[in-house]
Image (cartoon, rainbow, N blue to C red):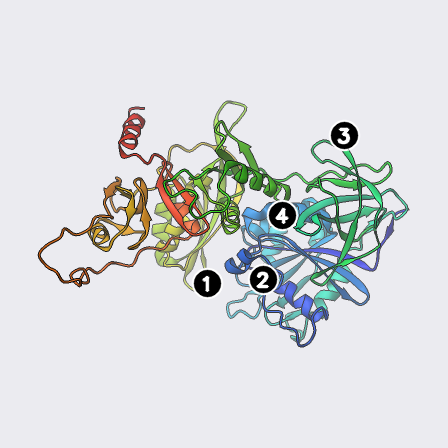
Amino acid sequence: MKQKRENIRNVAIIAHVDHGKTTLVDELLKQSGVFRDNQDVGIRVMDSNPLERERGITILSKNTAVTYKDTKINIIDTPGHADFGGEVERILKMVDGAILLVDAFEGPMPQTRFVLQKALDLRLPVMCVINKIDKPQARPTDVEDEVLELMMDLNASDEQLDCPFLYASSKEGFAKVKLEDEEKDMEPLFQAILDYIPAPVGDVEADTQMLISTIDYNEFVGRIGIGKIENGSLKLNQDAYVVNHHDPSKKSKVRITKLYTFDGLKRVDVQEAQCGEIVAISGIEDLHVGDTVITGEAEAIPFQKITEPTISMDFIVNDSPLAGQEGKFVTSRHIRDRLMRELQTDVSLRVEETDSADTFKVSGRGELHLSVLIETMRREGFEFAVSKAEVIYKTNDQGKKMEPIEIAYIDVPDDCTGTVIQKLTQRKGVLNGMSPLATGYTRLEFDIPSRGLIGYRGEFMTDTKGNGILNTEFDGYGEFRGELSYRHQGSLIAFENGEAVTYGLFQAQARGTLFIGPGEKVYSGMVIGQSPKSEDIELNVCKTKHLTNTRTSSSDEALKLTPKKIMSLEQCIDFIDTDELLEVTPENLRIRKKILDPTLRKRAVIARKNG
């Protein structure tokens, strides 16, 4: 018989990127007594991944648990960026309700719509917290109306529309039910979770069903599957079956050798866990996201369909003249094994083998999704090359070519709107609307192909002097809008192998912006800078000054070099053109031409022009 587990609540915190989810979880942990009074916990304690802390974004969803009034509250912090939406989609299957967090100034943003849509589709009760009300420009009452309008747009049920609204500042550590209430602590939010988020329901006596929603890895115990026990219970050393979500007829017998529940930031060993509880299990080698752990005659739980990837890149074995000098893992077998391992935890990723044994086509939800994978592999000691990001096309029933379309929401200073509109129109964007915002900003809404945004973010930040905000939301597939040139400037290309010297660089810097400095290794076909002209220019940066009768050693000191332009990984991915590759090693990022030999490269250009 099904019954409620009144002493448990399972809730996910969902929001647009940078609206304060992780800071809110920090406060809930602190005020529930998880940390000692004298414990130094820092900020954004849930962002444990080094990349997350550097970029200030959540990439992987995290589980934690707090206790309030003898009720255990399992909290899941989810990513806010659209590229990691796959994490949000599957996490919502694990919870019984969601806290929607919205910035009190920005209001609902593209990813707010995306995550809210997923929660409403699953019929989850959603409570709304309007965060950052301590901001000087905060407009909480307007934002509350905007959230309700959004919920109506997304066809929320009457029960979902009747959700509680709370006002909070994660940074200052308070939440309140009414704006005029005292700014005290997070108690009103804890109480609202108990009152509004339903307790999990399940049949303790039934056969066990547990959907694996997340996979973690630990070098001591191997793969760790995390999910909610829907029915029945799990015991330590119990025999069970794992049903493959791709093929439900595939059942493998397993034993639960480790069983954990969550307490604060720790996993706690337990002997038994019952339905409604979020648990982690280990000791099962072949366990994947979407699989169901069952006992007896129980059936598998259907897995949430994950939105398809829209962008792909080729990951290629590095074959440049400097290959193998800086990386620890360089062969196609190393790269293949690593990509296949990533597939086990990232359900939004696709990896396909190509005709070449040295090339793998990797598809993801966006440039950021793939760049995080590239950066992670690079830090692990991998060396490889990647191609220009390309969108994934489809063909509709009428045989027409279709491409992914995004809705771009852009907040720009009023004096930059003309430039942004012009640039996005050139990239096949269509302006759907303009509306003034407070403090001299305008919000633009564009309908634009995904490929039109490839390589645009860096240009956008330059055009808006770093003050613009660009958010995108995948809108589905639309008709192909015609060819598009990605880059209007050419590249400066090294003419020969060797080491860049000051004299050669001094001569070269008049031709464009340099990416390298003296003493750096270069090779023929390597891109060493950006040309202001549309065509590529070959330069000899290894050229030394001819000897003269002057014997002084200080004769070169008068040469003043302009500081080189240092490119981040994202900037490099944005910069490379379709005939270029990015060479990624643990120590360096080098841009190069696909064809290194200048004669063969010229022949390829002529052949391309002749069709």
Q: Which residue is mark 2?
A: 20
Residue shown at the point (39%, 32%) measured from the top left: 482
Q: Nearer the viewer, mark 2 or mark 4?
A: 4
Q: Which residue is mark 4?
A: 87
Task: Farthest residue to the left: give it.
Answer: 549
Residue shown at the point (39%, 45%) measured from the top left: 424
Q: Nearer the viewer, mark 3 or mark 2?
A: 3
Q: Looking at numbered disc 4 in the image, what kind of residue is underneath it? A: Glu
- Toward the viewer: 350 or 170? 350
Q: Position of residue 590 (x, y in %)?
A: 38, 46
Q: Position of residue 377 (x, y in %)?
A: 52, 47
Q: Which residue is mark 3?
A: 249
Q: Which residue is mark 1?
A: 438
Earlier in the chain: of badge 4 and badge 1, it is 4
Q: Quadrant of the C terminus?
A: top left
Q: Position of residue 515 (x, y in %)?
A: 32, 51
